[in-house]
Image (spheres, rainbow, N blue to C red):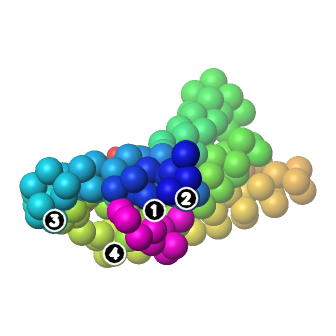
Amino acid sequence: MPRCAPLWWSANSTPDPSRSLRAPAFVVVERARAQRERDETGYEAVVPRGRATGYAEGMETLRQIVVFVHLIGFATLFGAWAVEAFGGQRRFTRLMQIGLAIAGVAGLILAAPWGLAEGADMNYAKIGTKLVVLLIIGALLGIGSARQRRGDAVAPALFWGVGVLTLLNAGIALLWG
Ligand code: HEM
């Protein structure tokens, strides 16, 4: 055995080449903990129901980070709209489009079932509804911005529609099941 044997070599006499040495730190720690438990008890560790492994915990954290980015997109879109609505010129701005794009991309990433806590389900009816609302917001922003470029004012229905539908999507996210 080499002097600086990898963690899993010291516990296993035959190295398993399928175990990558480049595994993330939390996976290595989790493997070492499981191996210690096997050595001490002679049994495969029984992971209690509901307790995530190190890898699953890492994915859950990553999902939370994407939710955070999603919320930044929402805040950017709604904040930019609120500035224009209350004291601004009631025009569509580039920041609104950027916020919508951030919320949309992060939302689509969240629409896939990964990094969920054990037993958590996806509500695809809710996600589909949010996607439709997002597309309508995008259409309103697109039509209004095109009129603005031609020098026309944004129609009040378009302008208020963007704010109301943005809040509607946040409400759906928080209040629907
Ligand atoms: C203007 C558009 C949008 C707004 C304002 C918005 C707002 C929000 C808010 C406030 C949350 C946080 C809810 C919580 O804390 O659980 C959320 C979560 C979420 N949103 Fe959106 N959203 C938008 C678009 C989308 C789109 C287009 C999708 C997918 C197609 C989407 C998918 C999701 C998912 C899956 C979550 C739950 C995250 C999780 O708990 O794992 N959202 N959204």
Task: State the mark number for residue 44.
Answer: 3
Whether residues under marks 1 and 3 lie with C-beta atoms below 8 angstroms apart, the answer is no
Whole-percent x, y for residue 58 in the image: 41, 51
Choose between 57 and 47: the one closer to the eye. Answer: 47
Choose between 81 and 112: the one closer to the eye. Answer: 112
For label 1, the residue is: 110
Inspect this view and state whether residue 58 appears.
no
Q: In this view, does 56 lie above or below 4?
A: below
Q: How crowded is mark 1: few (under 14 residues within 10 Å), some or many (20 or more)?
A: some
Task: State the mark number for residue 21.
Answer: 2
Mark with earlier residue (1, 2)? 2
Whether residues under marks 4 and 1 lie with C-beta atoms below 8 angstroms apart, the answer is no
Q: Nearer the viewer, mark 1 or mark 2?
A: 2
The answer to if 18 sits in the magenta stretch is yes
What element does badge 4 sit on?
A: helix
Disc 1 Cβ-to-ligand 1 distance below 8 Å:
yes
Mark with earlier residue (4, 3)? 3
Disc 2 Cβ-to-ligand 1 distance below 8 Å:
no
Residue type at numbered disc 2: Leu
The CA span between labels 4 and 1 is 11 Å
Task: Identify the residue at image location x=35%, y=62%.
Answer: 12
